[in-house]
Image: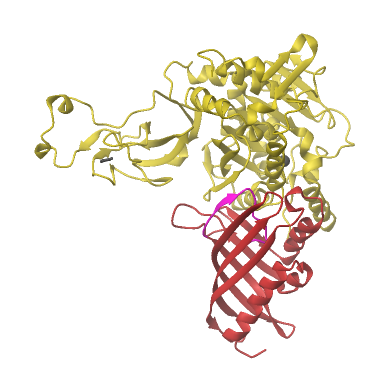
């Protein structure tokens, strides 16, 4: 880990995150986040702008605190959710990774993503795409995700989108 | 159409059955569009979606694109969102502000009252006298009325006044509208999703108390985890303070009301709890409306105004508009609906509760919509075409209201008072009786 985040380090972290979700290694995925992580996928206010203030406007997903993500993982893997059993097969492609700014305390990273999802249950393939904005912070000797904002560009949701397909 | 092929309604024999074909048949679907969505009152939106002069929003009635537009003087009107020239969709966005709509195809223009403003190169157009005498304004919906800020339109002119159509169910809209003296608003951020099943599955599920503990155990487990922890990171849930979802709870927990025209409510007692964002106004609301009505505002309520409006006030507050696309495809437009002027803390709580429960990216709705898709798949099995899901509560339903409806002076057609286990299904009868009435008669489909 270098004092200032490099693009190679950012790419490593983002690719690793994608792999962990794609291979359903959710416990390891959760470890990538700081305990007070902000995990945010805004809704669209109109054709061109997303919502900006999660306290006054609706988001598709908004959590402050990793323990909320733990809830989501628990539900996803509990076998108690019809929508999640069996889990769809997903593969994330993360590209266009850029370090926007970096100092010793934090770094901002942007990226583009597509996630292909095959819903075995319905024999249905979907593709979700958009942008990621991360704030990464050093935590116990490694860069961790302190904030992840997901801008989902195709937001007419085909039945369901869970945290593993965005 | 012989509706008895689809709805077997014999109260004297204790029989109410619905044929699976009602959800899959192309001819039934075509007739539903014509008779129900394009042939009677349909919910369009709420007034605050076009609050200021020249504001507009767009929606659909069945297949028909609709423009709801406020003019410079403040009058709201509703039009078919289609240019009289060659039919192009006129307003392109879900909402906006326009003194003038200019058609993107050949630039015919219309003012915010729907009147023709200009026809490009009209003088040079060598038009006939007949054309010059024709009105070139937008086609207004044959009927357009508002109730307490809820806007409804009809593409058929020969429908009863809106107040008659809503009937006693209007008092349930009052419970939403009266939560703030300033009225209602939609929280910015619209969520749209589709599911591959019939629109009536959404209609039913909103009123289906029976599925909650079966379809949502994963959500219930999350609630239990949060309850144990009481961490500041998690949002308080209204279910935590209620026995409503606990199968072993005893005593009257709620029930259902059925109304003429197909409107229904299922409800449960939550009590006046800080887990409900409205809690900050509990005292003021009791003063303004009396305790009985105030208590009703805090009850869990799932309201359907037939055929396309649902307002669910349970885990949070949602307004849904159902749009049938095909027999096996439905589009849902959903919003968080909230009283204007609530505190920042209450608004934040409402929004957080909403996202977790109602969003298609949340922890409850997907387990509903996926179940609709499972039903749609199962409906192809017509070895035994008649469904058995309309029978709970058959010996509990009574004509008229009960001591709870009296609190708001409401007289439904029928009511059921229930403990947590009864989970009435007779309220669905109201949907299908209205459906049968609307679909019956005319030439054979
Ligand atoms: S279709 Fe609108 S101007 Fe031609
Ligand atoms: Fe549900």
Q: Is residue B241 above or below residue B13?
A: below
Residue B428 occupies quadrant: top right
The chain letter of the yellow chain reads: B
The segment highlighted magenta reads: A153-166
Q: Residue at x 85, y 31 (%)?
A: B421
The chain letter of the red chain reads: A
Residues B235 and B426: in front is B426
Q: Residue at x 60, y 88 (%)?
A: A4
x, y percent for residue A146: 65, 73
x, y percent for residue A104: 61, 87
Quarter of image, ligand 2: top right
Q: Quadrant of the N terminus of chain A?
A: bottom right
Q: Does the magenta-highlighted stretch encompass residue A165?
A: yes
Residues B342 and B249: in front is B249
Task: For residue B178, say whether it is visible.
Answer: no
Residue most extreme to the top: B12
Q: Does the magenta-highlighted stretch encompass residue A68?
A: no
x, y percent for residue A24: 75, 66
Magenta portion: prevailing SS class: loop
């Amino acid at each position: 880990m270098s004092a200032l985040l490099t693009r190679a380090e950012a790419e490593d972290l983002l690719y690793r995150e994608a792999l962990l979700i794609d291979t359903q290694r959710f416990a390891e995925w959760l470890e990538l986040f700081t305990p007070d992580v902000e995990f945010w996928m805004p809704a669209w206010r109109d054709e061109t702008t997303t919502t900006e203030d999660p306290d006054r406007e609706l988001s598709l997903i908004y959590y402050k605190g990793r323990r909320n993500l733990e809830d989501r993982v628990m539900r996803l893997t509990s076998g108690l959710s019809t929508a999640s059993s069996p889990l769809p097969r997903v593969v994330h492609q993360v590209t266009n990774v850029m370090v926007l700014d970096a100092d010793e305390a934090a770094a901002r990273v942007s990226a583009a993503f597509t996630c292909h999802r095959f819903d075995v249950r319905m024999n249905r393939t979907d593709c979700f795409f958009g942008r990621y904005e991360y704030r990464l912070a050093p935590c116990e000797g490694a860069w961790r995700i302190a904030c992840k904002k997901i801008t989902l560009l195709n937001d007419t949701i085909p039945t369901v989108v869970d945290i593993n397909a965005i | 159409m012989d509706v008895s092929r689809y709805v077997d309604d014999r109260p004297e024999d204790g029989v109410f059955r619905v044929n699976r074909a009602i959800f899959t048949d192309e001819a039934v679907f075509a007739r539903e569009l014509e008779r129900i969505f394009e042939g009677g009152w349909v919910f369009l939106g709420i007034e605050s979606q076009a609050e200021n002069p020249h504001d507009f929003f767009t929606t659909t009635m069945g297949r028909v694109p609709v423009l709801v537009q406020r003019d410079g003087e403040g009058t709201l009107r509703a039009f078919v969102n289609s240019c009289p020239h060659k039919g192009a969709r006129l307003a392109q966005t879900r909402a906006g502000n326009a003194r003038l709509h200019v058609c993107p195809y050949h630039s015919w223009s219309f003012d915010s009252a729907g009147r023709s403003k200009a026809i490009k190169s009209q003088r040079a157009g060598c038009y006939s006298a007949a054309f010059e005498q024709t009105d070139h304004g937008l086609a207004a919906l044959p009927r357009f009325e508002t109730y307490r800020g809820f806007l409804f339109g009809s593409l058929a002119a020969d429908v009863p006044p809106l107040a008659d159509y809503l009937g006693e169910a209007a008092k349930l809209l009052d419970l939403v509208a009266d939560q703030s003296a300033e009225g209602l608003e939609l929280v910015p951020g619209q969520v749209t999703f589709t599911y591959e099943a019939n629109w009536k599955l959404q209609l039913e599920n909103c009123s289906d108390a029976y599925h909650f503990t079966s379809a949502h155990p994963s959500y219930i487990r999350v609630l239990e985890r949060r309850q144990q922890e009481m961490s500041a990171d998690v949002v308080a849930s209204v279910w935590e303070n209620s026995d409503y979802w606990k199968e072993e709870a005893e005593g009257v927990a709620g029930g259902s009301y059925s109304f003429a025209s197909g409107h229904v409510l299922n409800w449960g007692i939550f009590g006046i709890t800080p887990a409900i964002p409205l809690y900050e106004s509990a005292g003021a609301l009791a003063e303004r409306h009396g305790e009985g009505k105030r208590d009703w505002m805090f009850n869990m309520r799932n309201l359907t105004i037939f055929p396309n409006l649902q307002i669910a006030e349970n885990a949070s507050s949602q307004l849904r508009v159902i749009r049938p696309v095909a027999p096996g495809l439905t589009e849902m437009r959903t919003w968080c609906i909230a009283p204007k002027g609530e505190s920042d803390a209450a608004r934040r709580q409402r929004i957080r509760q909403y996202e977790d429960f109602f969003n298609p990216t949340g922890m409850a709705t997907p387990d509903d919509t996926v179940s609709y898709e499972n039903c749609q798949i199962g409906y192809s099995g017509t070895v035994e075409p008649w469904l058995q899901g309309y029978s709970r509560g058959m010996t509990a339903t009574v004509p008229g209201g009960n001591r709870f409806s009296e609190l708001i002076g409401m007289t439904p057609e029928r009511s059921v008072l229930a403990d947590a286990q009864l989970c009435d299904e007779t309220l669905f009868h109201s949907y299908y009786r209205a459906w049968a009435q609307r679909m019956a008669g005319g030439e054979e489909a």
